[in-house]
Image (tube, helix red, strand yellow):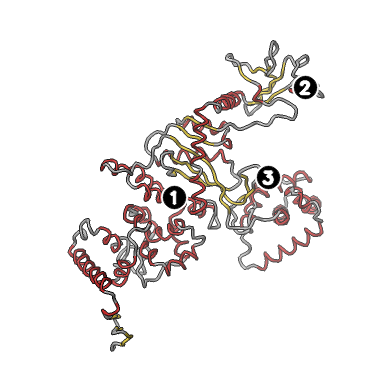
Amino acid sequence: MGATAIGAGSSISFDEQQITIRLDRKLFTPWRWELVTGLILRLQRFMADMRAGSDGLQGTNHLLERLLRRPWRHSALDLLSQLVYLLLIPTDHFLVRLDREIDLSFVDEEGADCYKWQPGHPGRPPWPAQLMFRLLLLMFLFGVPFETQLVLELQANLLWRWFIGLGVLEKVPDHSALHDFRQRLGPERFVRLLARILVVCQEWGLVGNLHLYFDCTAVLASATAFTPYQRAVLLAMAINRYLDLLEAHQVPDPSLLVSLRQLVIEVALEAVGSDSLNKVSPEQMARSLVRWEEKAKAMAQGPRWQEPMTQAVVEAAAEERPPTDRQGLLQVAKRLLAALPRAQGDLDARVGKTSNCWVFCGYLAGYVVDGLLGVVTAVVFAAGNAWQAALLSPALVQHQAHIVGQAQDMTIDSAFDYPEVHQALEVAGLKGYVASRDHHSPEGRFGPDRFTWTEEGRLICPRDGPDREMKAIRTHGDGRVTFQGTGCADCPLRGRCAGEDRSGSRSLTIHPQDHRRWLANRAANQSEEYKQAQKQRMAWENVFGHGNTYHHGDKAPYRSQPMNEIAEVMTVIAVNLEKMVRYGNRKRSLQAGTPA
């Protein structure tokens, strides 16, 4: 093919094998011409050294080597991409510093067995694991809300293309490739990737492993929660299918089934138990049931909630005794309700609380934060209705698996002032600074904090003088003991303790060991040591705020619990990588005599 002029002395030509572009020197200012030609000479020398098997341009040109060499690629970058990147990539950008200072080759090691393809095999090779990880990392480093948007921005962002190892003209992975990458690795491998990063954090002196902090944050589901009315309709459908299953197996007699079916709507409304359903008529519910059933039948694969509903119905039919009356059907309804999805877009999301006044639909994420620089050493993930205190123990196990050595203490807020948490801290060998949780006392009566223990192990009431001892009158199966006062009849505090209108003696049902621990922790919270520890905990709340604001920490981008767990681990990885770039290798800096 002949060359075609494109103005200003420039031309472009091509044949079946290549495209040739010629640019006239007049297009460049003198200093830019020297810059471009100098870069080309450096690039030529670098490529010659690479072909000769040397280690690049030895030290002074390490950045050039990092800009060009991408060992995880299946093929080398084209020369046009190499030149464009040398000209345009800013050497002081965060991504360049991250790439220069942190070796991510362990991603290839962790992902090696996830793909069957090997060099020399037929078929197109998969995208390299490190390339896909770097691409996914961009989503969480820069707060891109969805993978589809991430791919769109990648097409026009040269710096992002360079960071993940793509050439200027190369095709970019689509969102389905990212989905396949997440599915292949799974949550456990992503936690292992976090562990590998934490190994480097320890080697660099970024983890003190003395003072730890733990807290949970709400992660909002990428879904719309069912309204109470929708939940009632869904539950009524599940109850009907449960009765259909019983009928198919001829469990109850036909007349009982007829009577139970007449109670379905009434029982569904009661089981959901929302004030907004008080004015809903059975006729309205019946019409909605017909519409939902018709829509479900019209869908080729059925609605997404159909599979978990069927599973819940089958499990209830296998484990619950067939109901014989309204109360029995109500028990079945409550079991089914607990198993049914709570949101339309994410079947794993659940409704929970992070405080007495804020209800959300989604998940809970718990972080263990190291007290030196705020590196997150462990992350646990659960449905939104999980008990927060139960997340501490697995978080501590994960921390101890990730971090070498024994920490000294852990500080947490009053949401975790439960016996199970104190026991977990003891097992982990940690001193606990746990903010004291108030136990609400009955109206007009002294609370359990006013009842104390003597050195001999006797429970005594708040009054002064004799007859203070509380006698154990009943031991319960769960270890709790009911105590009763012995001198309540003539006690001057009776009106504030047992109440003026009450007869008999004051009683108190507690778990003795837990009550002692709670009182001891309540007293310890008044010390200056505890107050300082809690102040420092509040200072590290910024780790959650920063992760939530900039790295998806409080938003679930995917629509299942395993995938959203991966997202939360990626949030933590993004936070930790930021700290690694910010603080660098502190040990090496101290050895060199320069501040970190």
Disc nearer the start of the sequence (3/1):
3
| Residue drawn 53% across the image and 26% down it | 527
Q: CA gap, disc 3 to disc 1? A: 47 Å
Specify the amino acid type for callout 3: Glu
> Which residue is tagged 3?
320
* SS under mark 2: helix
Q: Is residue 16 above or below residue 258?
A: below
User: Which is in the foreground here, disc 3 or disc 1?
Assistant: 1
Q: Is residue 31 above or below residue 288?
A: below
> Which residue is tagged 2?
495
Residue 35: tell me if it is visible: yes
Tag of residue 575: 1
Q: Badge 2: how crowded within 10 Å, few (<14), some, or many (20+)? A: some
The percent position of residue 590, horizontal first and vertical second, equals 29, 41
| Residue drawn 65% across the image and 21% down it | 451
Q: CA gap, disc 2 to disc 3? A: 47 Å
| Residue drawn 27% across the image and 62% down it | 64
Q: Badge 3: how crowded within 10 Å, few (<14), some, or many (20+)? A: few
